[in-house]
Image: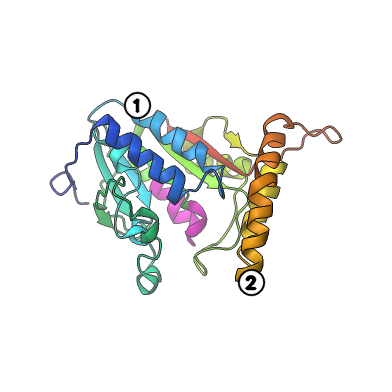
């Protein structure tokens, strides 16, 4: 197994630059105000993990950096760590190229190149070398789930942690590399089967955010002239209305043992 310490890019950014980068991720990449509010959980978790992980710790992030021009979206927040970004883009992504690069064409975006590209079952990283493994919004894009979870457990040290963020509600996207949707309970079981001990999941979103999400997606299917009209109708009034309801109507009043999260995150430890 290779050690990537020598090839890891060095980067150092001011607190102001990091805040600007965070703003770009919120506004343009994850579009939390207009399209994908549930990604606020991911961004909050990333900032928290960066602050809580000891300086110098080895952090491995599994991302799809090719889509954004070959960079790690979250590397800047881990500048105090031994950070390795693994580009897990499938071979089919080469044909499409960096089609999401327009999302990061902003002078505030901090471009940190990915460290390495590798397959899930051949990452090239040393066994038990990571203190923290980050898997942000990736699991559903991997066909070989058994190899993916086995690699989580192989990479992380005993006492180290694996962080996973996954959507529950998404349209088919990045076709054909979109394979499944985990529930938080299924994810916890899969992590346990891989030899990891998951903490209770964090859930985000509710039924009204789900409606808002579906409306935002549906607008893209309308003809150009109708889309402009209906976008104004939706965003001027109904998006904020739905999100306000979602903030206070968070319990099913008719059926128990029921929830409607849009996404979740889960942190698991290697015992």
Is the magenta region chiefly helix, strand or loop?
Answer: helix
Tell whether position 16 is magenta.
no
Location of residue 258 in the rendering, given as x and y in whole percent from the top left corner: 76, 37
- Magenta highlight range: 139-152
User: In the image, is residue 150 part of the stretch drawn in magenta?
Assistant: yes
Q: Which mark is residue 229?
A: none
Residue 226 location in percent, x, y? 66, 67
**Sequence-wise, which precedes: disc 1 or disc 2?**
1
Mark 2: few/some/many CA within 10 Å (<14, 14-19, 20+): few
Q: Residue at x 41, y 45 (%)?
A: 25
Q: Position of residue 182 (x, y in %)?
A: 59, 49
> Camera-side residue: 240 or 183?
240
Whether label 1 touches label 2, CB < 8 Å: no
Residue at the disc numbered 1: 51
Q: Which of the 4 image quadrants contains residue 67? A: bottom left
Q: What is the number of the mark on residue 223?
A: 2
Picture residue at 51% right of the left edge, 69% below the top: 176
Q: Residue at x 45, y 46 (%)?
A: 27
* SS class, disc 1: helix
Q: Residues within 10 Å of mark 1 (few under 14, many from 20)?
A: few
Q: Decide: is 140 above or below 38.
A: below
| Disc 2, SS | loop
Identify which residue, 159 or 48, lies in the foreground.
48
């Amino acid at each position: 197994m290779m050690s990537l310490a020598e090839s890891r890019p060095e980067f150092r950014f001011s607190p102001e630059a990091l805040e600007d980068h965070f703003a770009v991720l919120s506004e343009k990449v994850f579009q939390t105000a207009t399209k994908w509010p549930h990604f606020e959980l991911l961004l909050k978790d990333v900032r928290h993990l960066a602050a809580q992980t000891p300086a110098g710790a080895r952090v491995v992030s599994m991302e799809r950096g090719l889509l954004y021009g070959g960079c790690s979206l979250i590397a800047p927040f881990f500048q105090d760590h031994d950070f390795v970004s693994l580009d897990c883009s499938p071979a089919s992504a080469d044909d499409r190229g960096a089609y999401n690069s327009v999302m990061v064409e902003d002078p505030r975006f901090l471009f940190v190149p990915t460290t390495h590209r590798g397959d899930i079952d051949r990452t090239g990283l040393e066994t038990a070398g990571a203190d923290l493994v980050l898997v942000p919004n990736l699991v559903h894009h991997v066909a070989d789930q058994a190899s993916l979870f086995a690699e989580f457990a192989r990479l992380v040290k005993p006492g180290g942690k694996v962080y996973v963020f996954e959507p529950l509600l998404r349209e088919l996207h990045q076709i054909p590399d979109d394979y499944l949707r985990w529930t938080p309970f299924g994810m916890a079981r899969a992590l346990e089967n891989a030899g990891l001990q998951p903490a209770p999941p964090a859930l985000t979103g509710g039924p009204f955010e789900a409606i808002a999400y579906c409306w935002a997606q549906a607008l893209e299917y309308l003809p150009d002239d109708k889309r402009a009209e209906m976008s104004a109708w939706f965003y001027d009034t109904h998006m904020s209305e739905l999100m306000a309801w979602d903030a206070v109507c968070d319990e099913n009043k008719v059926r128990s043992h029921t929830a409607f999260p849009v996404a979740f995150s889960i942190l698991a430890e290697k015992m």
